[in-house]
Amino acid sequence: MSDAIDHVLAETRFFSPPEEFARQARLCSDEEYRELHRRSIEEPEEFWGGIADELVWYKRWTRVLNWDNPPFARWFEGGKTNITVNCLDRHLTTARKNKAAILWEGEPYQERRTLTYLELHRLVCRFANALKNLGVGKGDRVAIYLPMVPELAIAMLACARIGAIHSVIFAGFSAPSLVDRLNDAKAKAVITADGGFRRGQVIPLKSVVDEALLQSPTVRHVVVLRRTGTDVHWVHGRDHWWRDVMDPASSVCEPEPMDSEDPLFILYTSGSTGKPKGVLHTTGGYMVGTYLTTKYVFDLREEDTYWCTADIGWVTGHSYIVYGPLANGATTLLYEGAPNHPTPDRFWQIVERYRVNIFYTAPTAIRAFMKWGDGWPRRYDLSSLRLLGTVGEPINPEAWLWYHKTIGQERCPIVDTWWQTETGGIMITPLPGLTKTKPGSATIPFFGVDAAVVDEHGHELPPGKGGLLVIRRPWPSMVRTLWGDDDRFVEYYWSRFRQQGWYLTGDGAVRDEKGYFTILGRIDDVINVSGHRLSTMELESALASHPSVVEAAVVGFDHEIKGLGIAAFVTPAGGVLPGIQLAGELSEHVKKTIGAIARPDQVRFTDSLPKTRSGKIMRRLLRDIASGREIKSDTSTLEDYSALAKLYDEE
Ligand code: WT7
């Protein structure tokens, strides 16, 4: 059996970088990109050494890359640094000293805070001392379970300051998920809040922690931030108010000199099965990787206001709200709440108020904005925006075009950035001043990234043939291992191409003649219909190109005759009547766009699709729904499958 994926959608629209943008961009010539990319691959020592030299080290490395023992890479071996010195201290002797580092807006109205670099530095040092006073030191694991408040970034940086390893746990996770993560890492302390605000509701975080700690014996201290004023249960000796530990703490804290390969953080990512994987990132390589990608992919300039809407509970927030932007001395915006609280224009209000220049969000959010209607963004002045980005999933061309027109007003390049928790930083992406973008394509590999599309034997596939996306060389911000489980790390990512020493991404992709990569979704989701291997991304994009559709998810299900049938779950556009007629029209539309082979056997309509907490469609749940019920081609009642998702265990 071949692993090749049939590539069935042809996208022919290209968008050149707007002239005005290109004129001022850091990189604006193809030749320059090609030369830099070549050097980054062929002369990694010089290339990465040169970049690392832009940052501060206590001791220079002796070797840029040690790959003697794959897949365990060592970057900037022998080097010593502290990431907080690069994110904070080094800016204090420059004009950035009193520049806003973090702009924060809380979900409830009128709550705003600005932290300058100097203020952020002081708070980080004080909290670092507070942790020390509790007995937390280098190598200890600290779990952070906080809402999107500045203290979340402060806590992370304070850990990094003293060499403690942070493990940020998204504040939407339940007590059992917390238990798994705390126990796997043997966390010594937990930083949390009494509660968090979400769509006007209070989420009682401290009580979730209390419940989890009944089963997490390693945790000795809990620091609790007052956020919502919620009543909390208190364990004396174990629990401490944030204010009380901060009060006596000095604002002078010498940074711990960290070995380049000393762990910086663990971030748990749910595997499709089994227990969550503790992705481990280390100090030097992660620092250099996020610094460089932030600088070039977002074309950051001193005066920019930069906003990434992700939650810091995911890697996007680690790399592109906290570490990358601060390493570049940028102003990074943090918003606590939901995009539709109290009304669906909250994001555009924020863009207008802070004159956001760079805006980075997820396709799932973009499709929600489309569903809510153009009226919301139209009311606001979005003229400050100069660059847009997406991450997290393939973006279907319709959503891309909507983003381009309605938000970018045809003036802003869009960077569709492909990467993973494991890659630490952006891997495949347009460079906004030079790459001609193609809706739905993440385009070209970033510096140092040797990406390829191969078949199951590792043979590179020709343009237009879909296959496995692999990375053939180590890169600085790569995952170093899964916490406490080297075997699982080797098995999961490196066993498929052990001989070659290639990293298996788990994603399908296709390259075009220009060398552009288009991500086709997870390999496990590919649907094999009568011998044709169809990617979910292309089927979903075909459906979403119909004017009556805002979002679609496609899965395979057991079919008596064909073996596997195609089920489509469709969210119709506002004002569109779902029913048998529309179902027929959509089937016809897919047939016309892709071919008869791709015609869905079931079309179901839904108000909202079930998503994971990070916004990815829960295909496993949809497969069960599609397989488990009698087949009706016209579900005209709108079901809310996202409600079902809550009953499902994500891990
Ligand atoms: C998976 C990684 C990277 C930070 C957020 C998600 C999918 C991510 C794209 C993109 C198509 C994308 C892939 C990848 N993905 N970005 N631009 N185009 N697919 O991190 O939870 O580790 O998920 O997200 O399937 O493997 P993550």
Image: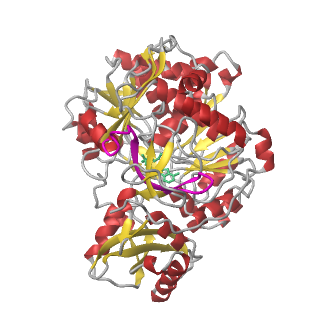
Residue 81 in view (yes/no): no
**In the rendered image of this protein, does residue 429 appear above or below residue 103?**
below
Q: Is residue 301 magenta?
A: no
Figure quadrant of residue 604: bottom left
Quarter containing the N terminus:
bottom left
Q: Residue at x 45, y 88 (%)?
A: 580
Q: Is residue 499 magenta?
A: yes
Q: Is residue 196 left or right of residue 372?
A: left
Name the side, left or right, on which 294 lies relative to 175.
right
Residue 306, horizontal then vertical, whole percent: 64, 40
- Name the residue nearer the viewer: 369 or 517: 517
Q: How many marks?
A: 0
Location of residue 20 in the rendering, given as x and y in whole percent from the top left corner? 80, 46
Q: Is residue 618 above or below residue 129?
A: below
Foreground residue, 635 or 449? 449
Q: How is the image coloured?
A: secondary structure
Range of magenta residues: 495-519
Position above or below: 310 against 65: below
Q: Residue at x 50, y 65 (%)?
A: 7
Could you tell me if residue 588 is visible in this image? Answer: yes
Q: Quadrant of residue 259?
A: top left
Q: Quadrant of residue 407?
A: bottom right
Rendering coords of residue 500 (x, y %): 38, 39
| Nearer to the camera, 258 or 599 | 599
Q: Position of residue 536 (x, y in %)?
A: 44, 65
Q: Residue at x 36, y 51 (%)?
A: 457
- The residue shown at (55%, 57%) is 463
Q: Is residue 218 left or right of residue 395?
A: left
